Amino acid sequence: MAFLFGRNRQRSAQDIVRSSKDLLQKLAKEETPLPKTEEDLSRTLTLMKVTLQGTPELEATPDAVYQLVNSVLAESLLPILVDNIHRLPFEARKDTQTIISNVFRFRNPGSTSPEPDALKEVLRRQPEIIIALCNGYDRRESASPCGGILKEALKWDAVAAVILYDEPADPSGKTIDIYNDVDVTKPSTGQGIFWKFFPWIDKSSFEVSADAFDCFRLLLTKHKQLVSQYNATLIQSDSYVTKRQSLKLLGEILLDRQFYEVMTRYVDRGDNLKLVMYQLKDDRRMVQYEAFHVFKIFAANPNKSYEVQKFLIMNKQRLLKFLPKFLEERTEDEQFCDEKAWLVKAIGNLPDSTSALRAPEVGKQAGGVSVQGQQQVSSAQVRS
Protein backbone atom coordinates (compact mmCIF):
# COMPACT_ATOMS: atom_id res chain seq x y z
CA MET A 1 0.00 0.00 0.00
CA ALA A 2 1.23 3.44 -0.93
CA PHE A 3 0.66 4.97 2.48
CA LEU A 4 2.66 2.29 4.25
CA PHE A 5 6.15 2.12 2.88
CA GLY A 6 9.76 2.12 3.81
CA ARG A 7 9.79 -1.14 5.82
CA ASN A 8 9.97 -4.79 4.85
CA ARG A 9 6.90 -6.78 5.76
CA GLN A 10 7.49 -9.70 8.06
CA ARG A 11 6.89 -12.97 6.28
CA SER A 12 4.90 -14.32 9.21
CA ALA A 13 2.37 -11.48 9.00
CA GLN A 14 1.98 -11.98 5.27
CA ASP A 15 1.58 -15.73 5.72
CA ILE A 16 -1.13 -15.27 8.37
CA VAL A 17 -3.07 -12.90 6.13
CA ARG A 18 -2.77 -15.07 3.03
CA SER A 19 -3.73 -18.16 4.99
CA SER A 20 -6.81 -16.34 6.34
CA LYS A 21 -7.77 -15.22 2.85
CA ASP A 22 -7.43 -18.75 1.44
CA LEU A 23 -9.53 -20.19 4.26
CA LEU A 24 -12.22 -17.52 3.79
CA GLN A 25 -12.42 -18.31 0.07
CA LYS A 26 -12.69 -22.00 0.93
CA LEU A 27 -15.39 -21.31 3.52
CA ALA A 28 -17.42 -19.30 0.99
CA LYS A 29 -17.47 -22.30 -1.39
CA GLU A 30 -18.56 -24.85 1.21
CA GLU A 31 -22.33 -25.30 1.28
CA THR A 32 -22.04 -26.54 4.86
CA PRO A 33 -18.88 -25.24 6.57
CA LEU A 34 -16.47 -28.05 7.44
CA PRO A 35 -15.37 -28.11 11.10
CA LYS A 36 -11.69 -28.15 10.08
CA THR A 37 -12.09 -25.06 7.91
CA GLU A 38 -13.82 -23.24 10.76
CA GLU A 39 -11.19 -24.31 13.29
CA ASP A 40 -8.23 -23.35 11.10
CA LEU A 41 -9.80 -19.99 10.25
CA SER A 42 -10.70 -19.28 13.87
CA ARG A 43 -7.10 -20.01 14.85
CA THR A 44 -5.61 -17.58 12.31
CA LEU A 45 -8.12 -14.87 13.23
CA THR A 46 -7.30 -15.25 16.92
CA LEU A 47 -3.61 -14.94 16.08
CA MET A 48 -4.28 -11.74 14.14
CA LYS A 49 -6.33 -10.32 17.01
CA VAL A 50 -3.58 -11.04 19.54
CA THR A 51 -0.96 -9.51 17.25
CA LEU A 52 -2.99 -6.30 16.94
CA GLN A 53 -4.08 -5.78 20.53
CA GLY A 54 -1.98 -8.13 22.63
CA THR A 55 -3.15 -10.00 25.72
CA PRO A 56 -2.97 -9.28 29.47
CA GLU A 57 0.29 -11.26 29.51
CA LEU A 58 1.73 -10.18 26.16
CA GLU A 59 1.80 -6.60 24.93
CA ALA A 60 1.43 -5.93 21.20
CA THR A 61 4.58 -4.52 19.59
CA PRO A 62 4.33 -1.50 17.24
CA ASP A 63 6.38 -3.22 14.54
CA ALA A 64 4.26 -6.38 14.57
CA VAL A 65 1.09 -4.28 14.41
CA TYR A 66 2.54 -2.29 11.51
CA GLN A 67 3.49 -5.42 9.59
CA LEU A 68 0.10 -7.03 10.04
CA VAL A 69 -1.93 -3.92 9.13
CA ASN A 70 0.27 -3.44 6.08
CA SER A 71 -0.33 -7.05 4.99
CA VAL A 72 -4.08 -6.87 5.60
CA LEU A 73 -4.35 -3.85 3.30
CA ALA A 74 -1.84 -5.07 0.72
CA GLU A 75 -3.60 -8.43 0.36
CA SER A 76 -7.11 -6.86 0.31
CA LEU A 77 -8.25 -9.07 3.17
CA LEU A 78 -10.91 -6.68 4.48
CA PRO A 79 -13.49 -7.07 1.66
CA ILE A 80 -13.58 -10.86 1.83
CA LEU A 81 -13.51 -10.76 5.63
CA VAL A 82 -16.55 -8.47 5.77
CA ASP A 83 -18.43 -10.38 3.06
CA ASN A 84 -18.06 -13.67 4.94
CA ILE A 85 -18.40 -12.53 8.54
CA HIS A 86 -21.90 -14.06 8.78
CA ARG A 87 -20.45 -17.49 7.93
CA LEU A 88 -17.98 -17.46 10.81
CA PRO A 89 -18.51 -19.13 14.19
CA PHE A 90 -19.63 -16.78 16.98
CA GLU A 91 -16.22 -16.23 18.61
CA ALA A 92 -14.56 -15.79 15.21
CA ARG A 93 -17.09 -13.06 14.38
CA LYS A 94 -16.11 -11.24 17.57
CA ASP A 95 -12.41 -11.61 16.70
CA THR A 96 -13.11 -10.25 13.22
CA GLN A 97 -14.79 -7.18 14.71
CA THR A 98 -11.71 -6.58 16.86
CA ILE A 99 -9.35 -7.07 13.91
CA ILE A 100 -11.13 -4.65 11.56
CA SER A 101 -11.61 -2.02 14.28
CA ASN A 102 -7.89 -2.17 15.13
CA VAL A 103 -6.93 -1.87 11.47
CA PHE A 104 -9.21 1.16 11.09
CA ARG A 105 -7.56 2.80 14.14
CA PHE A 106 -3.98 2.38 12.89
CA ARG A 107 -1.87 5.52 12.52
CA ASN A 108 1.68 5.81 11.24
CA PRO A 109 4.05 7.32 13.81
CA GLY A 110 4.00 11.11 13.46
CA SER A 111 0.95 11.10 11.21
CA THR A 112 -1.03 14.36 11.11
CA SER A 113 -3.94 13.03 9.02
CA PRO A 114 -7.41 13.81 10.46
CA GLU A 115 -8.43 10.17 9.99
CA PRO A 116 -6.25 7.21 10.97
CA ASP A 117 -3.96 6.35 8.06
CA ALA A 118 -5.32 2.85 7.45
CA LEU A 119 -8.92 4.03 7.49
CA LYS A 120 -8.09 6.88 5.12
CA GLU A 121 -6.50 4.38 2.73
CA VAL A 122 -9.61 2.20 2.86
CA LEU A 123 -11.86 5.19 2.18
CA ARG A 124 -9.74 6.28 -0.77
CA ARG A 125 -9.33 2.89 -2.43
CA GLN A 126 -12.18 0.70 -1.20
CA PRO A 127 -15.03 2.78 0.29
CA GLU A 128 -17.32 -0.11 -0.64
CA ILE A 129 -16.03 -1.83 2.52
CA ILE A 130 -18.07 0.68 4.55
CA ILE A 131 -21.12 -0.13 2.42
CA ALA A 132 -20.52 -3.87 2.94
CA LEU A 133 -20.38 -3.29 6.70
CA CYS A 134 -23.76 -1.53 6.51
CA ASN A 135 -25.15 -4.48 4.57
CA GLY A 136 -24.21 -6.61 7.56
CA TYR A 137 -27.61 -5.57 8.93
CA ASP A 138 -29.18 -7.84 6.31
CA ARG A 139 -28.33 -10.84 8.50
CA ARG A 140 -28.76 -11.43 12.22
CA GLU A 141 -25.35 -13.15 12.43
CA SER A 142 -23.42 -10.20 11.02
CA ALA A 143 -25.46 -7.29 12.42
CA SER A 144 -23.70 -6.98 15.77
CA PRO A 145 -20.05 -7.27 14.64
CA CYS A 146 -20.56 -5.08 11.56
CA GLY A 147 -22.55 -2.57 13.62
CA GLY A 148 -19.82 -2.45 16.26
CA ILE A 149 -17.19 -1.64 13.64
CA LEU A 150 -19.38 1.03 12.04
CA LYS A 151 -20.31 2.75 15.30
CA GLU A 152 -16.66 3.20 16.19
CA ALA A 153 -15.69 4.30 12.67
CA LEU A 154 -18.53 6.84 12.54
CA LYS A 155 -16.59 9.22 14.75
CA TRP A 156 -14.97 10.28 11.44
CA ASP A 157 -16.89 12.55 9.06
CA ALA A 158 -15.51 10.79 5.99
CA VAL A 159 -17.10 7.48 7.06
CA ALA A 160 -20.46 9.20 7.61
CA ALA A 161 -20.12 10.84 4.19
CA VAL A 162 -19.65 7.44 2.50
CA ILE A 163 -22.97 6.29 3.98
CA LEU A 164 -24.91 9.54 3.51
CA TYR A 165 -23.83 10.17 -0.08
CA ASP A 166 -23.62 6.62 -1.39
CA GLU A 167 -25.38 6.14 -4.72
CA PRO A 168 -25.78 3.13 -7.06
CA ALA A 169 -22.52 2.00 -8.62
CA ASP A 170 -21.08 4.05 -11.45
CA PRO A 171 -21.72 2.17 -14.76
CA SER A 172 -18.06 2.69 -15.63
CA GLY A 173 -17.02 0.89 -12.46
CA LYS A 174 -15.13 3.96 -11.24
CA THR A 175 -14.77 4.15 -7.47
CA ILE A 176 -15.88 7.53 -6.11
CA ASP A 177 -13.21 9.49 -4.26
CA ILE A 178 -15.05 10.48 -1.08
CA TYR A 179 -12.62 13.36 -0.53
CA ASN A 180 -12.98 14.95 -3.97
CA ASP A 181 -15.85 13.54 -6.02
CA VAL A 182 -18.88 13.96 -3.74
CA ASP A 183 -21.35 16.69 -4.71
CA VAL A 184 -23.33 17.43 -1.54
CA THR A 185 -25.76 19.68 -3.46
CA LYS A 186 -26.82 16.93 -5.86
CA PRO A 187 -30.27 15.48 -5.00
CA SER A 188 -30.28 11.95 -3.67
CA THR A 189 -31.78 9.19 -5.82
CA GLY A 190 -32.98 7.38 -2.71
CA GLN A 191 -31.14 4.26 -3.90
CA GLY A 192 -28.01 4.49 -1.75
CA ILE A 193 -27.13 2.51 1.38
CA PHE A 194 -28.52 5.23 3.68
CA TRP A 195 -32.06 4.31 2.61
CA LYS A 196 -31.66 0.71 3.70
CA PHE A 197 -31.55 1.88 7.32
CA PHE A 198 -35.32 2.50 7.17
CA PRO A 199 -36.30 -1.18 6.61
CA TRP A 200 -33.49 -2.37 8.88
CA ILE A 201 -34.90 -0.24 11.69
CA ASP A 202 -38.59 -0.87 10.96
CA LYS A 203 -38.75 -4.46 9.78
CA SER A 204 -35.81 -6.38 11.29
CA SER A 205 -35.69 -8.43 14.48
CA PHE A 206 -35.39 -6.46 17.71
CA GLU A 207 -31.62 -7.01 18.00
CA VAL A 208 -30.90 -5.95 14.42
CA SER A 209 -33.34 -3.04 14.56
CA ALA A 210 -31.85 -1.68 17.81
CA ASP A 211 -28.29 -1.91 16.49
CA ALA A 212 -29.21 -0.29 13.16
CA PHE A 213 -30.98 2.55 14.95
CA ASP A 214 -27.95 3.13 17.21
CA CYS A 215 -25.82 3.46 14.08
CA PHE A 216 -28.38 5.76 12.46
CA ARG A 217 -28.49 7.87 15.62
CA LEU A 218 -24.73 8.37 15.43
CA LEU A 219 -25.07 9.56 11.85
CA LEU A 220 -27.51 12.21 13.01
CA THR A 221 -25.87 13.33 16.24
CA LYS A 222 -22.17 13.15 15.43
CA HIS A 223 -22.32 14.77 12.00
CA LYS A 224 -24.86 17.58 12.28
CA GLN A 225 -23.42 19.63 9.44
CA LEU A 226 -23.49 16.72 7.00
CA VAL A 227 -26.97 15.67 8.03
CA SER A 228 -28.39 19.20 7.93
CA GLN A 229 -27.38 19.42 4.28
CA TYR A 230 -28.82 16.00 3.60
CA ASN A 231 -31.99 16.55 5.63
CA ALA A 232 -33.32 19.23 3.29
CA THR A 233 -32.70 16.89 0.36
CA LEU A 234 -34.63 14.10 2.06
CA ILE A 235 -37.70 16.10 2.98
CA GLN A 236 -37.84 17.87 -0.39
CA SER A 237 -37.41 14.65 -2.34
CA ASP A 238 -39.85 14.01 -5.21
CA SER A 239 -40.15 10.40 -4.05
CA TYR A 240 -43.29 9.75 -2.00
CA VAL A 241 -41.65 6.96 0.02
CA THR A 242 -38.52 9.01 0.63
CA LYS A 243 -40.42 12.09 1.78
CA ARG A 244 -42.90 10.22 3.96
CA GLN A 245 -40.27 8.04 5.67
CA SER A 246 -38.01 11.03 6.23
CA LEU A 247 -40.75 13.07 7.88
CA LYS A 248 -41.90 10.12 10.01
CA LEU A 249 -38.41 9.38 11.27
CA LEU A 250 -37.73 13.07 11.83
CA GLY A 251 -40.80 13.35 14.05
CA GLU A 252 -39.81 10.29 16.07
CA ILE A 253 -36.25 11.51 16.49
CA LEU A 254 -37.27 14.98 17.61
CA LEU A 255 -39.43 13.47 20.36
CA ASP A 256 -36.73 11.05 21.52
CA ARG A 257 -35.11 12.43 24.71
CA GLN A 258 -31.74 11.12 23.53
CA PHE A 259 -31.95 13.69 20.71
CA TYR A 260 -32.74 16.62 23.00
CA GLU A 261 -29.88 18.77 21.69
CA VAL A 262 -30.79 18.00 18.08
CA MET A 263 -34.45 18.83 18.77
CA THR A 264 -33.70 22.20 20.41
CA ARG A 265 -31.51 23.27 17.52
CA TYR A 266 -33.97 22.05 14.91
CA VAL A 267 -37.06 23.78 16.33
CA ASP A 268 -35.13 27.03 16.81
CA ARG A 269 -34.68 27.55 13.07
CA GLY A 270 -37.31 29.37 11.07
CA ASP A 271 -36.18 27.79 7.80
CA ASN A 272 -36.91 24.33 9.25
CA LEU A 273 -40.40 25.49 10.20
CA LYS A 274 -41.00 26.84 6.71
CA LEU A 275 -39.84 23.57 5.16
CA VAL A 276 -42.17 21.51 7.38
CA MET A 277 -45.16 23.85 6.88
CA TYR A 278 -44.72 23.56 3.14
CA GLN A 279 -45.17 19.78 3.47
CA LEU A 280 -48.55 20.34 5.17
CA LYS A 281 -49.80 21.40 1.74
CA ASP A 282 -48.47 18.34 -0.09
CA ASP A 283 -51.13 16.67 -2.22
CA ARG A 284 -50.42 13.28 -0.64
CA ARG A 285 -52.34 12.65 2.58
CA MET A 286 -49.74 10.56 4.39
CA VAL A 287 -47.03 13.15 3.70
CA GLN A 288 -49.36 15.79 5.22
CA TYR A 289 -49.99 13.52 8.20
CA GLU A 290 -46.28 12.95 8.90
CA ALA A 291 -45.55 16.67 8.45
CA PHE A 292 -48.26 17.50 11.00
CA HIS A 293 -46.46 15.47 13.66
CA VAL A 294 -43.27 17.48 13.08
CA PHE A 295 -45.09 20.83 12.89
CA LYS A 296 -46.77 20.28 16.27
CA ILE A 297 -43.32 20.09 17.91
CA PHE A 298 -42.59 23.67 16.83
CA ALA A 299 -45.97 24.78 18.20
CA ALA A 300 -45.51 22.90 21.50
CA ASN A 301 -42.19 24.59 22.26
CA PRO A 302 -42.92 27.24 24.94
CA ASN A 303 -39.57 28.96 24.30
CA LYS A 304 -39.80 29.56 20.58
CA SER A 305 -37.01 31.49 18.91
CA TYR A 306 -37.72 34.97 17.56
CA GLU A 307 -37.74 33.85 13.92
CA VAL A 308 -40.10 30.91 14.65
CA GLN A 309 -42.52 33.15 16.59
CA LYS A 310 -42.40 35.76 13.85
CA PHE A 311 -43.17 33.28 11.10
CA LEU A 312 -46.04 31.68 13.04
CA ILE A 313 -47.60 35.05 13.85
CA MET A 314 -47.28 36.23 10.26
CA ASN A 315 -49.15 33.08 9.18
CA LYS A 316 -51.58 32.95 12.11
CA GLN A 317 -54.76 33.73 10.18
CA ARG A 318 -53.85 31.41 7.32
CA LEU A 319 -53.19 28.59 9.78
CA LEU A 320 -56.44 29.17 11.65
CA LYS A 321 -58.27 28.91 8.35
CA PHE A 322 -56.27 25.92 7.14
CA LEU A 323 -55.98 23.67 10.21
CA PRO A 324 -59.69 23.02 11.02
CA LYS A 325 -60.15 21.46 7.57
CA PHE A 326 -56.77 19.74 7.58
CA LEU A 327 -57.23 15.94 7.10
CA GLU A 328 -60.78 16.33 8.38
CA GLU A 329 -61.66 12.83 7.17
CA ARG A 330 -59.55 11.30 10.00
CA THR A 331 -62.52 11.40 12.38
CA GLU A 332 -61.75 8.00 13.92
CA ASP A 333 -58.19 8.97 14.87
CA GLU A 334 -58.95 10.42 18.31
CA GLN A 335 -55.35 11.30 19.15
CA PHE A 336 -54.90 13.18 15.89
CA CYS A 337 -58.20 15.06 16.40
CA ASP A 338 -57.21 16.01 19.96
CA GLU A 339 -53.78 17.19 18.85
CA LYS A 340 -55.21 19.19 15.97
CA ALA A 341 -57.72 20.88 18.30
CA TRP A 342 -54.90 21.71 20.71
CA LEU A 343 -52.80 23.06 17.84
CA VAL A 344 -55.62 25.32 16.63
CA LYS A 345 -55.97 26.67 20.17
CA ALA A 346 -52.20 27.21 20.52
CA ILE A 347 -52.01 29.10 17.22
CA GLY A 348 -55.08 31.14 18.20
CA ASN A 349 -53.35 32.23 21.41
CA LEU A 350 -50.45 33.75 19.49
CA PRO A 351 -50.30 37.58 19.28
CA ASP A 352 -52.00 39.12 16.26
CA SER A 353 -48.97 41.23 15.42
CA THR A 354 -45.20 40.83 15.49
CA SER A 355 -44.84 44.31 16.97
CA ALA A 356 -44.93 42.88 20.50
CA LEU A 357 -42.04 40.54 19.77
CA ARG A 358 -38.64 41.33 21.17
CA ALA A 359 -35.85 40.89 18.67
CA PRO A 360 -32.84 38.91 19.97
CA GLU A 361 -29.76 40.86 21.01
CA VAL A 362 -26.92 40.89 18.52
CA GLY A 363 -24.57 37.98 19.15
CA LYS A 364 -27.00 36.36 21.60
CA GLN A 365 -28.69 33.12 20.65
CA ALA A 366 -32.45 33.20 20.90
CA GLY A 367 -34.76 30.35 21.65
CA GLY A 368 -33.80 27.08 23.22
CA VAL A 369 -35.94 24.73 25.22
CA SER A 370 -35.85 24.64 29.02
CA VAL A 371 -36.36 21.48 31.06
CA GLN A 372 -40.01 22.43 31.49
CA GLY A 373 -40.21 23.14 27.78
CA GLN A 374 -38.70 19.76 27.00
CA GLN A 375 -41.42 18.11 29.07
CA GLN A 376 -44.12 20.07 27.24
CA VAL A 377 -42.68 19.22 23.82
CA SER A 378 -42.26 15.57 24.80
CA SER A 379 -45.91 15.42 25.87
CA ALA A 380 -46.89 15.83 22.21
CA GLN A 381 -46.15 12.16 21.67
CA VAL A 382 -45.84 10.71 18.20
CA ARG A 383 -48.56 8.19 17.45
CA SER A 384 -47.75 4.51 17.55
Image (cartoon, rainbow, N blue to C red):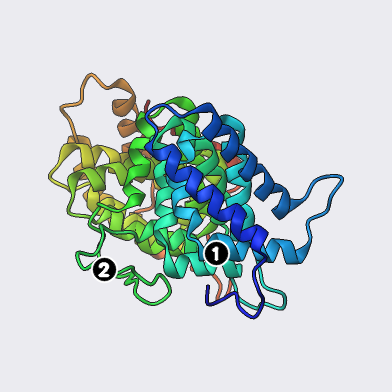
Secondary structure, mark 2, is loop
Crowd around label 2: few <14 · some 14–19 · many ≥20 (10 Å): few
Secondary structure, mark 1, is helix
* Vertical placement of residue 248 versus 191, above or below: above
Q: Residue 79, position in %: x, y?
A: 44, 53
Quarter occupied by residue 148: top right
Amino acid bearing label 2: Lys
Q: Is residue 115 visible?
A: no
Amino acid bearing label 1: Leu
Residue situated in front as seen by the camera: 180 or 57? 57
Residue situated in front as seen by the camera: 341 or 1? 1
Quarter occupied by residue 18: bottom right
Residue situated in front as seen by the camera: 370 or 144? 144
Judge left or right: residue 147 versus residue 128: right
**Residue 217 disc label:** none
Q: Residue furthest bottom?
A: 6
Q: Residue 250, position in %: x, y?
A: 38, 45
Q: Which residue is label 2 attached to?
A: 186
Judge left or right: residue 324 versus residue 343: left
Q: Residue furthest left?
A: 283
The residue depicted at 56 percent of the width and 76 percent of the height is 3
Judge left or right: residue 111 versus residue 185: right
* Vertical placement of residue 7 versus 352, above or below: below
How many angstroms separate mark 1 from mark 2 (CA)? 26 Å
Q: Residue 362, position in %: x, y?
A: 55, 76
Q: Is residue 185 visible?
A: yes
Judge left or right: residue 168 versus residue 329: right
- The residue mark sitting in front, 1 or 2, is 1
Q: Residue 197, position in %: x, y?
A: 38, 43
Sequence-wise, the earlier of marks 1 and 2 is 1
Q: Which residue is label 1 attached to?
A: 119
Q: Residue furthest right?
A: 57
